[in-house]
Amino acid sequence: MNSNEAYQKHYVAVIGGSVAGSEAASMLAENGFRVVVFDMNRLPYGKIEDGLPNWHINLRNRQIQEIDKKLNHPNIRFVPLTKVGETINFSELVNDWGFSAVIMANGAWKDRHLPIANIDKFLDKELIYQNAFINWFNHKHEKNYKGKKYTIRSKNLVIGGGLSSIDVVKAIMIELVKNKLKQQNIDVDIFALEKYGIPKILAQYNLNFDDLNIDKVKLVYRRTARDMPLKSPKDGSLKSIEAAKTVSEKILTRYVEKFLFDFIPLSVPVNFTEKEGKLTGVIFQKVTLENGKIKPIEDAFFEIETEMLVSSIGSVPEKIEGLPYQYTSLKMRDDADYHVFGYDNVFAIGNAITGKGNIIESKKHGKQMTEVIIDKHLTDDAFEKWLIAYNTQLKNDVHQQIEGIIREISASEIQPEAIIKGILDKTDAIHTKIGYSTYIDWVTENIPVRLEEILKK
Ligand SMILES: Cc1cc2nc3c(=O)[nH]c(=O)nc-3n(C[C@H](O)[C@H](O)[C@H](O)COP(=O)(O)OP(=O)(O)OC[C@H]3O[C@@H](n4cnc5c(N)ncnc54)[C@H](O)[C@@H]3O)c2cc1C
């Protein structure tokens, strides 16, 4: 057990330690609750570590520091390398461990399936999904990188339409230019290319883009540049929506000028071509928009040849057995969209709910919903109700111990000693197995070497 863990209110579990999870854990801890934060990865930084492309040096460092500050709290036990749904069964966690509440802050890690029949036969060969692609891009320089390995080819195609798909396009264009310049003994790092853009960097060496003989990456989107969610409207008014659309179009134009890719709007993928078992192209159908709805144009098909297709059409929460889902999203109660359907004490915050959002939105949602959870669902009365229900469903010896002391315990707002011991023993066992001692030691030992540090040497 961590020696500085203060014995205060009852134990709550938070699944996922990143932006939303660390916000929830810190608020709970500050309010006297004891929290176990489970994360499937070594580090609790989620999409900050593996989603944001690594050129966001300052943003990433700032967010990591914030997460560390929040999770390094005496009331919080961080339990890494523990995937709920795999390492720990979700039903056991909710029903047997004895947490008075479980907050899902597990983000959205499953790429939406590219809707072309049989396309997945090319998976991780000519077809790559965005989450795996950015993970590779961010970590490929690490000596002990053990993830999937990709090679950027000459003809690259990206299907998508949000900031993440633009990040993918940028990453590919930057790699292509960097590699071509290297062949001419010019060393330019990705940070300079991202900051100044390709034309400015080439101008420094009196080069034109055409001299490099690079095929521009093609970004295909089913709507128009104005429809890209690059700028959120201030409010729901028509004026704000139109203003946001105009800004989105300008942002896209600016990216095209800076990173020299081709943008192809109003087209949806319908089929593919292949040769000798390799993907060689994607067939698209042109569409129009009628009252915001996509309408395919008859007989308007075209093919884009490709050697590497990255699908970047969004992420959804990974399904966990035992949780209810409606299509790809967690099923929430009608009256409370943070409260998971069918459970009294399971909640969800951040990207885990919609799969969409950004850092600010995840943080804000984590904060607002945790406030509500504390005020409405972690009160003394709610705790007593939970304790009675928990006790009733127990069929083991813990039942006997709880029976007599339930009133006394609910007044002091802590789980019975047997439950606390169970939580501490189980999490201690995981800590011992993985060699975890303290939060700060763990994250310091496990933080990967950064590309910017390597380049400085
Ligand atoms: C390519 C890309 C670029 C982006 N660029 C920006 C940007 O420029 N600015 C911006 O504001 N936002 C950006 N975002 C979005 C932003 O990164 C996310 O919205 C935000 O980090 C989500 O925070 P979260 O805590 O809700 O989820 P995540 O960061 O996804 O955290 C979820 C955590 O849960 C853990 N977890 C998942 N499943 C389990 C499980 N079963 N058991 C235990 N642990 C689990 C994960 O390991 C992770 O630590 C970008 C995203 C992507 C993909």
Image (cartoon, rainbow, N blue to C red):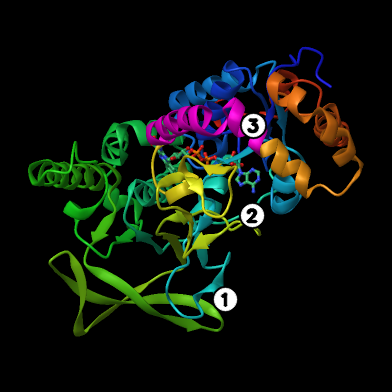
Side of 62 relative to 433 (left or right) = left
Of marks 2 and 3, which one's residue comes earlier in the chain? 2
What residue do we see at 52% from left, 20% from top? 66
Report the residue marked by disc 2.
148
The yes-or-no answer for disc 2 within 8 Å of ligand 1 is no
Q: CB under 8 Å between callouts 2 and 3?
A: no
Q: Is residue 381 magenta?
A: yes
Residue 434 in view (yes/no): no
Q: Is residue 396 above or below residue 121?
A: above
Residue 205 or residue 310, whichever sits in front: 310
Say whether residue 77 is left or right of residue 346.
right
Counting from the top left corner in percent of width and height, residue 97 is at 77, 41
Which sits in the foreground, 284 or 171? 284
Which amino acid lies under the numbered mark 2 shown in the image of this protein?
Lys
Residue 294, visible in the rendered structure:
yes
Q: Residue at x 71, y 53 (%)?
A: 91
**Main secondary structure of the magenta stretch:** helix
Find residue 371 and report its horizontal and vertical position in percent. 47, 27
Query: In this figure, which residue is indicated by the disc labeled 1?
Result: 121
**Residue 161 percent coordinates (x, y):** 31, 55
Label 2 crowd (10 A; few <14 / some 14-19 / many >=20): few
Question: Mark 3: which amino acid?
Answer: Phe
Q: Is residue 239 left or right of residue 230?
A: left
Residue assigned mark 3 = 383
Q: Residue at x 73, y 42 (%)?
A: 390
Q: Which residues are magenta?
A: 359-385
Q: CA distance from mark 2 to mark 3?
A: 45 Å
Task: Report if the CB atoms under discs 1 and 3 are less than 8 Å apart.
Answer: no
- Residue type pointed to by label 1: Lys
Q: Distance of mark 1 from mark 2, alpha carbons? A: 16 Å
